[in-house]
Image (cartoon, rainbow, N blue to C red):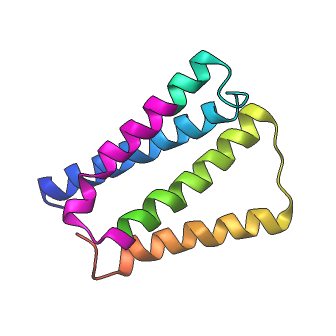
Amino acid sequence: MPASAVTTYLFLGAAIVAEVVATSALARTENFTRLLPTVITVVGYALSFWLLSFPIRVLPTGIVYAIWSGAGIVLITMVAWFLFDQKLDLPALLGLGLIIAGVAIINLFSKSMVH
């Protein structure tokens, strides 16, 4: 994988992590009345979108958004499960599995991706 492709995926991964941190904090803002979670949420989302602006220059917008949102959904669900004790039933787990499969298919087989 060329260095530019590695950089593209590093920015995308960082954007996903920033979004997950922001969403985790959002659950604790209490309608934006608590300062620290509110600041983390706003900064996290701003950072996520800034980081997302780099891979979107190289990869198709729909593909970048599919990976960003899909990975974000799965990771925030894992955070909610382990940190906030929000358990999921079998249909929810199967749905998340389909999201993971979709992101994997895009990354492994799409000719739209930088490989």
**Magenta stretch encompasses residue 27:** no
- Residue 64 x %, y %: 36, 64
Image position of 51 (left or right of 78)? left
- Residue extent of the magenta highlight: 42-62
Residue at the image position 75 percent from the left and 62 percent from the top: 93
Q: Quadrant of residue 88?
A: bottom right
- Relative height, residue 81 to residue 43 (above, below): below
- Residue 28 x %, y %: 70, 28
- Residue 98 x %, y %: 63, 73
- Relative height, residue 1 to residue 43 (above, below): below
Image position of 72 (left or right of 48)? right
Residue at the image position 37 percent from the left and 81 percent from the top: 109
Image position of 8 (left or right of 24)? left
Residue at the image position 52 percent from the left and 56 percent from the top: 71
On the rendered image, what quadrant is the N terminus found in?
bottom left
Residue at the image position 53 percent from the left and 62 percent from the top: 70
On the rendered image, what quadrant is the C terminus found in?
bottom left
